[in-house]
Amino acid sequence: MKRQQETVGSIVQIHINDEFYVYAQILPHGLLAFFDYKSDTELSDLNVLKNAKVLFITAVYKYVITKGIWLKVGKIPIREDLQVLPLRFVYDRIREKFFTYNPETGETAPTTIDVAKKLERAAVWDDKQIEERIKNHYDGVPCKWMQETFELFNMVP
């Protein structure tokens, strides 16, 4: 595996089960934006991603990038809609309450389940979990790694 820096703005290529390629952009604060773009062949023009829908934005363990598990294939400017990082949610099991988490400031604030349902959970994923989540998305099946979050929303009135 190739050692590489975690450079904000860089695009990483993810080869899903030797079936297709997807791409993500490294954002500040350890987050990546995963694009709703898949191809049977490697992407030759990264500018295609400038208009691609974003599947989700989440944190991935740093080693996935630095150890070259996902290779950096170029760099493009971060799009305007990705300049401000989205809030994430946290659930406090002891108090049974939801909070928003701002990845740019680290601040949390109480929120409602209805707001939390619209946000990505504040969590760090490994490469295999993300790859499975993306494959499940394109296969139209539920992701086992999201099950706890789904159950969380069903259990809270």
Image (cartoon, rainbow, N blue to C red):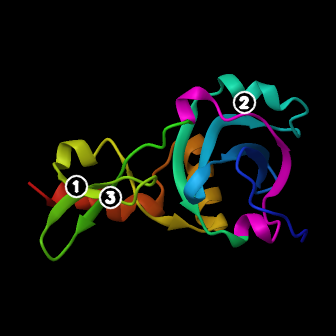
Query: Residue 86's image quarter?
Result: top left
How much space separates mark 3 and mark 1, taking CA atoms? 7 Å
How much space separates mark 1 and mark 2, taking CA atoms? 33 Å
The amino acid on which the numbered mark 2 sits, given as a three-letter code, is Leu
Under circle 3, the secondary element is loop
Residue 133, percent from left and from top: 56, 54
Residue at 70%, 50% in the rendered image: 8
Q: Label 2 neighbourhood size at 10 Å, few (<14), some (14-19), many (20+)?
A: many
Position of 18 compared to 77: left or right?
Answer: right
Under circle 1, the secondary element is strand
Closer mark to the observer between disc 1 and disc 2:
1
Residue at 65%, 66% in the rendered image: 128
Q: Which residue is mark 2?
A: 49
How much space separates mark 2 and mark 3, taking CA atoms? 30 Å
Q: Which residue is mark 1?
A: 109
Q: Label 1 neighbourhood size at 10 Å, few (<14), some (14-19), many (20+)?
A: few
Q: Which residue is mark 3?
A: 107
The amino acid on which the numbered mark 1 sits, given as a three-letter code, is Ala
Residue 103, percent from left and from top: 44, 55
Which residues lie in the magenta part?
64-82
Residue at 26%, 48% in the rendered image: 116
Q: Is residue 142 above or below residue 151?
A: above
What number is the disc on residue 140? none
Which label's residue is closer to the chain start, 2 or 3?
A: 2
Marks 1 & 2, CB-CB < 8 Å contact = no
Under circle 2, the secondary element is helix
Q: Nearer the viewer, residue 22 or 144?
A: 22
